[in-house]
Image: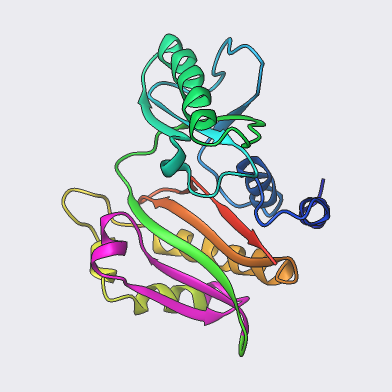
Amino acid sequence: MNPEEIFKAALAENRKHLSLLEAFEVIESYGLPLARYIYIKEGDEVKDIRDLSFPVVLKADSPDIVHKTELGAVKANIRSMDELKTAISQMRQKILEKNPAVKIRGYIVQEQVSNAHEVIIGGLNDEQFGPVVAFGLGGIFVEILKDVVFDIAPITIAQAQELILKIKGYQILEGYRGLPKANIKLLAEVLSKASQMFAENAKYIKEMDLNPTFVSSEWVKIADARFALK
């Protein structure tokens, strides 16, 4: 399905959020870079992880789960196929114990990204300005610095570069505690494209959260996503 069909189908079910897989499908349709992943349908046997390599991150896919950590719907540092199978079983059990009404559609097994900066790319519908794109530092810095900047979406690559430069902690992206210098040009391209995605679908989306997004000197990878619907 194209993005509009995904949003319309979710709204037709009176849902307030896309599932994680649906969010990834919207992102991929715009050519945005996702951390590599495979999808396992609920009930299917896990036989291999194809082109991924351990360690990996496991995430439950459900339209009913908004905050995965609270329900135990995410687990990192899985280092073998046996660990993965056990993690899926335990995750299913933990989620349903906490909320038996949750509909688990499947599981996303994703590469575990390391040695990169964490940033946040977001979007919100402002009553006065309409679609607005947000950018800021992620990880530990989002809580400590609360360093987020905004612009009206969509923005060009040049405008995205200017927005990135506006955060107070920009110097961190120049290299910090052994992390590589962030590829600002590539990050600006992703930020611009994400703002276009949000603006074009703003009639369906209340909020967009691409967090964490990882950036190194060579690549940008979106590792998680949340779309809150109107």
What coloring was used for the rendering?
Answer: rainbow
Identify whether 111 is placed above or below 43: below
The image shows residue 78 at horizontal and vertical percentages of 38, 22
Query: 19 and 210: which one is in front?
Result: 19
Residue 174 part of the magenta segment: no
Name the residue: 43% across, 35% down: 72
Residue at the far left in the pictured view: 177
The image shows residue 26 at horizontal and vertical percentages of 69, 51
Query: 187 and 5: which one is in front?
Result: 5
The image shows residue 159 at horizontal and vertical percentages of 51, 79
Q: How many marks?
A: 0
Instruction: Give residue 45's quadrant in the image.
Output: top right
Identify whether 205 is placed above or below 179: below
The quadrant of the image that shows the N terminus is top right
Identify whether 3 is placed above or below 151: above
Name the residue: 46% across, 39% down: 71
Query: 15 and 115: which one is in front?
Result: 15
Q: Is residue 49 left or right of residue 145?
A: right
The quadrant of the image that shows the C terminus is bottom right
Residue stretch rendered in magenta on the structure: 130-158
Name the residue: 56% across, 69% down: 123
The image shows residue 217 at horizontal and vertical percentages of 35, 51
Instruction: Give residue 171's quadrant in the image.
Output: bottom left
Residue 132 part of the magenta segment: yes
Name the residue: 65% across, 44% down: 63
Q: Is residue 209 left or right of residue 144?
A: right
Residue at the far bottom in the pictured view: 128
